[in-house]
Image (tube, grey):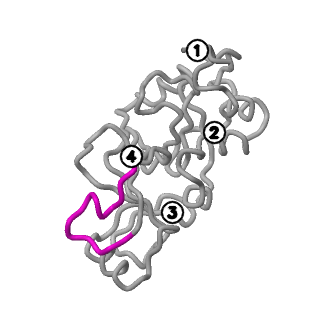
């Protein structure tokens, strides 16, 4: 469904897609995996893009997902439709967790999983500095750029604190509202405009 205000995101976007930036979906993007999604771009280069959806909680905990894992009260999110049998994670642990990959500012993805379990056992990791995902979002070379031309995404800089502090389902709304102007108007669009 086209947005009723016919806002052209391709004209409003002032940023290019890049590692560490957010993709905020068009309010009426038809793909159910990305409906009102906020995607963190963990990688973006000439070969394509890799990201994780930040605001689709699955209603399960990491201990529901893994058998051999320390007791840890952390929710698991749907990272995307690709490889839904694999676990991914982002965090603010930095060099404390070996093999971490820097994304932006104090934000990292992946790392040595055994070391992570040991840090959790020692109480050095909290829900406020890590988030787990099943699956990821991926784009082949040039695919994301085509979607941007088609007004599927708004690009924003990343607010690391908002990622970990915001309730997952409110993140899409909160980021657009904070961006102001026409973006803030989009934040209040009903999911089904025919119900208004």
Please determine whether, in this image, residue 113 is positioned above or below residue 158.
below
Residues 150 and 182: in front is 182
Q: Which residue is the site of mark 1?
A: 2
Q: CA distance from mark 3 to mark 4?
A: 16 Å
- Please name whichever residue, 12 or 194, is drawn nearer the observer in this view of the structure: 194
Q: Quadrant of residue 24?
A: top right
Say if mark 1 contacts mark 2, CB within 8 Å.
Answer: no
Q: Residue at x 58, y 27 (%)?
A: 27
Q: Earlier in the sequence, mark 2 or mark 4?
A: 2
Which comes before the other along the chain, label 3 or label 2? 2
Q: Position of residue 134 (x, y in %)?
A: 32, 49
140 or 86: nearer the eye?
86
Q: Indicate which label's residue lies in the foreground, 3 or 1.
A: 1
Where is mark 3, residue-wise? 107
Q: CA distance from mark 3 to mark 1?
A: 34 Å
**Residue 64 relative to residue 77: left or right:** left
For the residues marked 1 and 2, what is the alpha-carbon distance in whole angstroms? 22 Å
First reached walking from the N terminus: tag 3 or tag 1 = 1
As helix, strand or loop, the secondary structure at mark 2 comes to loop
- Picture coordinates of residue 36 (x, y %)? 53, 34
Give the magenta-colored segment's residue range: 59-72
Q: Is residue 90 magenta?
A: no
Give coordinates of residue 48: x percent, y percent.
38, 38
- Residue identifier under label 4: 79
Q: Residues within 10 Å of mark 3 (few under 14, many from 20)?
A: many
Say few, some or many: other residues with alpha carbon within 10 Å of mark 1 (under 14 / 14 to 19 / 20 or more): few
- Quarter of the image where the N terminus is located: top right
Residue matched to label 2:
15
| Mark sitting earlier along the chain (1/4) | 1
Outermost bottom residue: 122
């Amino acid at each position: 469904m086209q947005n009723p205000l016919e806002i052209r995101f391709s004209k409003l976007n002032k940023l290019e897609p890049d590692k560490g930036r957010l993709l905020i979906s068009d309010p009426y993007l038809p793909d159910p995996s990305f409906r009102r999604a906020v995607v963190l771009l963990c990688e973006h280069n000439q070969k394509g893009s890799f990201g994780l959806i930040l605001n689709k909680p699955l209603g399960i905990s990491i201990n529901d997902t893994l058998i051999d894992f320390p007791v840890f009260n952390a929710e698991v999110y749907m990272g995307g439709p690709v490889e839904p049998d694999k676990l991914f994670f982002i965090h603010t642990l930095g060099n404390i967790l070996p093999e971490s990959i820097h994304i932006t500012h104090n934000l990292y993805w992946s790392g040595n999983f055994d070391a992570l379990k040991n840090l959790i056992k020692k109480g050095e990791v909290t829900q406020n500095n890590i988030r787990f995902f099943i699956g990821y979002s991926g784009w082949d070379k040039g695919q994301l750029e085509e979607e941007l031309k088609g007004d599927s995404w708004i690009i924003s800089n990343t607010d690391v604190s908002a990622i970990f502090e915001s309730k997952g389902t409110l993140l899409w709304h909160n980021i657009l509202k904070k961006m102001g102007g026409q973006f803030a108007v989009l934040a209040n669009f009903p999911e089904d405009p025919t119900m208004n």
